[in-house]
Amino acid sequence: MYWMADVENRIKKGNLVLFARNSDFLHELATLIQEQNHRALVLWAFDCADETVQDLLERYPDEKRLEAAVLAAKEWAFGKVKMPVAKRAILQAHGAAKEIASLADIALCHPVGQA
């Protein structure tokens, strides 16, 4: 596992993102992403985000900011709201990550905001 040294280095530096964009570990995924059209990627991101939000809601049933962020992003994608509205909800999803103690769950919150 050649990539583990890179991950361990990033952890030592306090990095919460464990893989660099150009990581060899992510090469196959990056290639697949480049071959897709934008709409397919957006729909895939929403599917992943929805699944993650449902998983997090099981542990944090009162945390509504993550679900609100995905909903706002979908509304933006379909032209129902402007980006500033969606951006506020997205930033609140990242804020939810700051209030959670579990590193694993923090690691799930940020991609929801990114999606």
Image (cartoon, grey):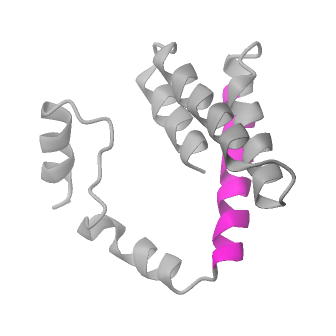
Q: Is residue 94 left or right of residue 37?
A: left
Asked if residue 54 is among those painted magenta in the image, a careful observer would answer yes
Residue 47 screen position, x and y as percent: 73, 56
Residue at 65% x, 58% y is: 45
Picture residue at 12% right of the left edge, 42% below the top: 9
Percent of width and height locating residue 23: 25, 64
Q: Toward the viewer: 2 or 111? A: 111
Direction from residue 33 to residue 18 in the image, left or right: left
70 with respect to 90 (left or right): right
Q: Which residues are magenta?
A: 38-56
Q: How many marks?
A: 0
Which residue is painted at 13% across and 34% down in the image? 13
Q: In the figure, is residue 113 to the left or right of 8?
A: right
Q: Position of residue 102 (x, y in %)?
A: 46, 18
* Residue at the far bottom in the pictured view: 35
Q: Is residue 28 above or below residue 100?
A: below
